[in-house]
Image (tube, grey):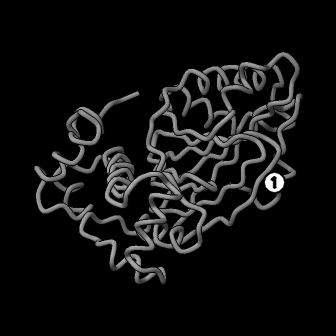
Amino acid sequence: MLPLNPESFRPCAERPVRVVARAMGMPTEISAHHHPWGQAVFSDAGVVQVEMANVAFIVPPQHAVLIPPGTEHSAVLLQDASLFSVYVFLQESGQEARQRFWDRCKVVRASPLLLELVRRLVDEDLPHRDTGRYRALCVVVLAELQDAREVGIGVPMPTERRLRMLCEAFLAEPRQSKPLAQLARDAGASVSTASRLFRDELGMGFQQWRRQALFARALALAAEGMPMQRIAEELGYSSASAFTAMVTKTFGKSPREFLLQRP
């Protein structure tokens, strides 16, 4: 997510971690862009959807999506949100391990320590503040990021125009009851064409893709503290048991075991 003047927050060897904090309300969309530094987008409150060319991440609170340098990405708020954009300088010599950590997009769980350090850096990254303290905070933030546990909640996204439109429409209002026929018609494709595109572009059928998308949204709702019964209703399941069966079949764990894991 780019601030109004991104160059003023460009990380460098002297200031390797820069943090921009913003409270943002719906509807807010951030158009596709890229930059030469690494970025971690934290949701402190609310849910944000971050999209790249071939994957979408629904980022719940106390999580972050990591974006490698040069990766084009866009974002849309799914709820009013309090966001931190953490820009990371990755070009220092001797940092091969750090650069390998940023080689692909991923979602990680943010520890309470990491979140507090990021909040502190908002105030410490100022010209009149103590440089030694700022640098020490940067070291710990980078170490905490690299130790953060990855959460596999990415939703594969196609590049074909009609299928992309279909998938984005579903992610905007994810409901188990939405049939492929309706989504395909709205995107200007037949059911047979949409089914073929799912197989050709994503290597899976619509139902499998829909399960992954619903689970990603369920994780975000669980992180917000929504009860399991409400999550099932929100996602259009006829009952909590039907939702439980979907999660257990797909991931081998019950929703409570999987969704409510903590960092």
- Left or right of residue 232, residue 90 in this image: right
User: Residue 116's x, y, as percent?
Assistant: 55, 31
Q: Residues within 10 Å of mark 1 (few under 14, many from 20)?
A: few
- Left or right of residue 7, residue 46 in this image: left
Which residue is rendered at x = 72% and y = 48% of the image? 71
Say what secondary structure mark 1 lies in.
helix
Closest to the observer: 24 or 174? 174
Judge whether 230 appears above or below 125 on screen: below
Which residue is rendered at x = 41% and y = 77% of the image? 184
Closest to the observer: 182 or 195? 195
* Image quarter of residue 173: bottom left
- Left or right of residue 215, residue 7 in this image: right
User: Residue 200's x, y, as percent?
Assistant: 51, 58
Closest to the observer: 178 or 11? 178
Which residue is rendered at x = 57% and y = 57% of the image? 23
Quadrant of image for the N terminus: bottom right
Residue type at mark 1 is: Pro
- Left or right of residue 212, residue 106 in this image: right
Which residue is rendered at x = 49% and y = 67% of the image? 168
User: Residue 81's x, y, as percent?
Assistant: 50, 56
